[in-house]
Amino acid sequence: MPVNGRSHIRVARPSRDLAAAERFWAGGLGLGVVWRTGERPGPGEHHLLMVGWAEADWHLELVHEPDRPVEPRPTEEDLLVIYVDGPVPGELVARLEEHGGRRVPSPNPYWNEWGVTVEDPDGYRLVLCERAWSNR
């Protein structure tokens, strides 16, 4: 099968604390747990948490390797943008904050005008954009 617009995308990121990441992404944003490793992966294996929406063509893979942890190094431009196609619900932002997120201003005025930026427990940024996505 060729790579095309329907190819599934996995965004992989290191995480300091998978439980905190799950609280934010699943409990806060509402993503489902797609897959996770068992409590005790074998020697040299990672702890993995994959979250996403069942109908989406993408998911997040969050990785923690206790024997050789990788410190997340997000910048303020490492964004996951979700186009909400309407006002960003205040209760969603509040739920993200209650689940470990922190609302932050964006250095890009576009995201401050058209959305809300929330930092996850590892410092990666989620932007909820009130605009609709159009590739036209």
Image (cartoon, helix red, strand yellow):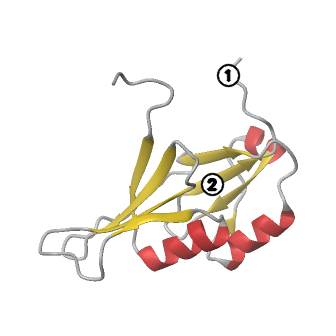
Label 1 crowd bin: few (<14), some (14–19), many (20+), radius 10 Å: few
- In the rendered image, residue 132, in percent from the top left (x then y), is placed at 78, 35
Left or right of residue 97: residue 18:
left
First in sequence, mark 1 or 2: give its number: 2
Q: Residue at x 57, y 66 (%)?
A: 25
Residue at disc 1, secondary structure:
loop
- In the rendered image, residue 123, in percent from the top left (x then y), is placed at 53, 63
Q: Looking at the image, which is closer to me, 16 or 8?
A: 8
Q: Residue at x 86, y 45 (%)?
A: 86
The quadrant of the rendering that contains the C terminus is: top right
**Above-or-below relation of 87 to 100:** above
**Which residue position holds label 2?**
126
Q: CA distance from mark 1 to mark 2?
A: 20 Å
Mark 1 belongs to which amino acid? Asn
Q: Residue at x 29, y 64 (%)?
A: 70
**Which residue position holds label 1?**
135
